[in-house]
Amino acid sequence: MEQKFPLPPFTYETALQKVQMAEDAWNSQDPEKVSKAYTTDSEWRNRDTFLNGREAIVKFLTAKWEKEHRYKLKKELWAFTGNRIAVRFEYEYHNAGGQWFRAYGNENWEFDPNGLMQKRYASINDVAIEESERRL
């Protein structure tokens, strides 16, 4: 049986560890690697996009990182309980035209008993910035 440690129920330390692992995986910009943190039938809402399953996650992330260049993400633990974690995040990237953006958002995560994320709900907004305004 596939497991992704740490397992729920989360403590402050293990919730922080899960958040850091997610940040590291997303910053790798490797869709296959990122998808391994999710159940095979994981349910996602990302802005106005609804996805189910690892295959859809890989396809979504591949397209995302083809458009978002020099992507850099920072996640912060917001709250946790039992098998759920809430995070706030920001990331920066530029598009093919060279316009930089900073995206802000919140995610709610729910994990199965094996530590795989079975639900991810993300609310995100983007703000155009100048390259000189980058923080990440």
Image: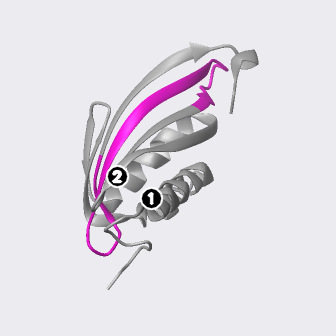
Instruction: Report x, y in % for residue 8.
Output: 33, 69
Looking at the image, residue 84 lies above or below residue 101: below
- Which of the 4 image quarters holds residue 73? top right
Q: Nearer the viewer, residue 94 or 4?
A: 4
Whether residue 47 sits left or right of residue 58 in the image: it is: left
Mostly what secondary structure, the magenta segment?
strand
Task: First in sequence, mark 1 or 2: give its number.
Answer: 1
Give the residue displayed 34% in from the left and 60% down from the top. Answer: 55
The image's mark for residue 91 is none
Residue on which the image places disc 1: 12
Q: Nearer the viewer, residue 17 or 22?
A: 17
Residue on which the image places disc 2: 80
Looking at the image, residue 132 lies above or below residue 52: above
Looking at the image, residue 107 lies above or below residue 41: above
Whether residue 87 sits left or right of residue 21 in the image: it is: left
Give the residue displayed 50% in from the left and 56% down from the top. Answer: 16
Segment colored magenta = 92-120
> Mark 2 Cα within 10 Å, few/some/many (few <14, many 20+)?
many
